[in-house]
Image (spheres, rainbow, N blue to C red):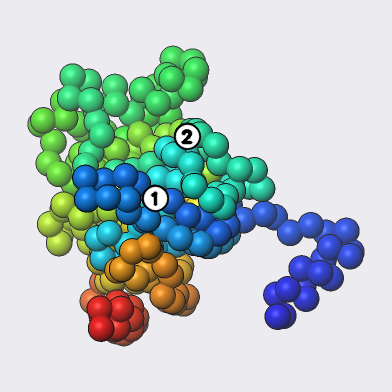
Amino acid sequence: MASQLAIVAETRAGIHPAPNKISFRGVSKGFSTPGGWVRALDDFSLDIAPGEFVCLVGPSGCGKTTALNLAAGFFRPDAGAVVSDGAPVLKAGPERMVVFQEQALFPWMTVRGNVELGLQLAGKPRKERQITAAFWLRRMNLDRFQNAYIYQLSGGMKQRAQLARALALSPAVLLMDEPFAALDALTKDMLYAEFQTILSATHQTVLFITHNVREAAVMADRIVVMGGSQPGRVRGEFTVDLQRPRDSDSPGVTELSSKALEMLKGDEG
């Protein structure tokens, strides 16, 4: 109520609050499958503020990736609307970059070539592409491997390359679909720390999909827990008020992970 009163006061004073970076407004989405029609989301609503890092946590089949794909503009809702900066999301665009679980990198290109590709498609001049790619390769600790091909990289390096390509375009929103799921625990912890440091400087808005409650507690400003039954729905959410950078074994992260896990277990019962 207090936040609503503040918005009213600001509007009367001629100050208009910035729109949410991403909003899902009563969104429903279904798909035809060999087993029949499946409704992945129904009356799904969620607001993500500019610069906020939101994790959607839940089991497979709860609609997490469907929500991310709608935010990306890969397809449209059957009902409701997905809105970015006050405008409907009708198609994919470079302002909303997707980082996939499987590295969507081109094996016939070098690491540098992969990072420069998005910039080339965006029409950036060659010199700017080179400077920007060099910056992000250095930032992601890949400058020594810029001339390597994708098959020559470890899993962690491949994910760094994918992040460098996405960040090189300076997107307003990063949509991340379990990007660290296939990595070993040590590599995950390293990327958690690196990515938190980068976001503290770039202030991108992030919608992050994960099954891992501890990963969500390490990374997010807010954890949104989704139920496992179809259609997907929000069971609850937690604000993460922990100082960054966060350690995955810290007491605060452990406590919050336990709360989110209990909420997920409650959905099974």
Is 121 left, or right, of 158 in this rendering?
A: right
Dot 1, crowdedness within 10 Å: few (<14), some or many (≥20)?
A: some
Q: CA distance from mark 1 to mark 2?
A: 19 Å
What residue is drawn where x is 37% and y is 55%? 39
Which of 187 and 14 lies nearest the eye of the viewer? 14
Looking at the rendered image, the quarter that the C terminus falls into is bottom left
Q: Residue at x 25, y 34 (%)?
A: 104
Residue wearing tag 1: 30
Give the image quarter of residue 161: top left
Q: Amino acid at mark 2?
A: Ala
Disc 1 is placed on an element classified as strand
Q: Is residue 216 left or right of residue 43?
A: left
Lower sequence index among marks 1 and 2: 1
Front label number (1 vs 2): 1
Tell me if mark 2 has few (under 14), some (14-19) or many (20+) residues whose alpha carbon lies within 10 angstroms of its own.
some
State the image coordinates of residue 67 (x, y, percent, origin top left): 42, 53
